[in-house]
Image (spheres, rainbow, N blue to C red):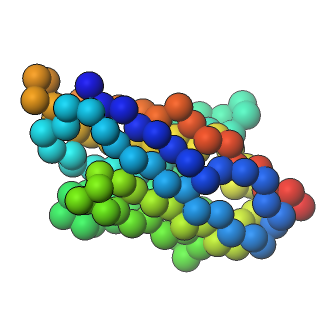
Amino acid sequence: QVQLVESGGGLVQAGGSLRLSCAASGSIFSINGMGWYRQAPGKQRELVAIATRGGTTTYADSVKGRFSISRDTAKNTVYLQMNSLKPEDTAVYYCYTRANTWTSDARDYWGQGTQVTVSS
């Protein structure tokens, strides 16, 4: 199994910055994509940003130019630098990975979520 532990959420004023971190651990054989989703109250979970093993990154249109995703493949860690935060960025942010373990084929794993609240 793979465990994802997130950190870095909190309360920030509009225009401020936060940095989320997520570390993967467990019986990992290989990690494919790692990234972040978010879910606001009453809305569906949506992709924020994702980075493939090869380094390709994808962002939601709503965060392009403000958020930046990076990975430390040696540490199985992914980061999300969030700048120029807006109240509409308020949500629970979930770390995501697709990984193979030594005993199972590739499957999706999720973190427990970290709250990001942006006040106006």
Q: Residue furthest right?
A: 120
Task: Kindly indicate the quadrant of the structure image that contains residue 93.
Answer: top right
Which residue is painted at 47% across and 35% down in the image?
111
Answer left or right for 108 relative to 22.
left
Answer left or right for 16 relative to 52.
right
Figure check: 22 above or below 74: above
Figure check: 47 above or below 71: above
Horizontal and vertical percent position of residue 16: 75, 70
Horizontal and vertical percent position of residue 1: 26, 25
Figure check: 61 above or below 77: below
Which residue is painted at 27% across and 66% down in the image?
56
Q: Work out whether residue 87 can be spotted.
A: no
Q: Quadrant of the C terminus?
A: bottom right
Horizontal and vertical percent position of residue 22: 45, 49
Task: Kindly indicate the quadrant of the structure image that contains residue 72.
Answer: bottom left
Q: Work out whether residue 35 can be spotted.
A: yes
Which residue is painted at 49% across and 70% down in the image?
68
Which residue is painted at 42% across and 33% down in the image?
110
Q: Residue furthest bottom?
A: 65
Please tell me how many numbered marks the rendered image carries.
Answer: 0
Answer left or right for 3 relative to 26.
right
Horizontal and vertical percent position of residue 30: 15, 44
Answer left or right for 19 relative to 12.
left
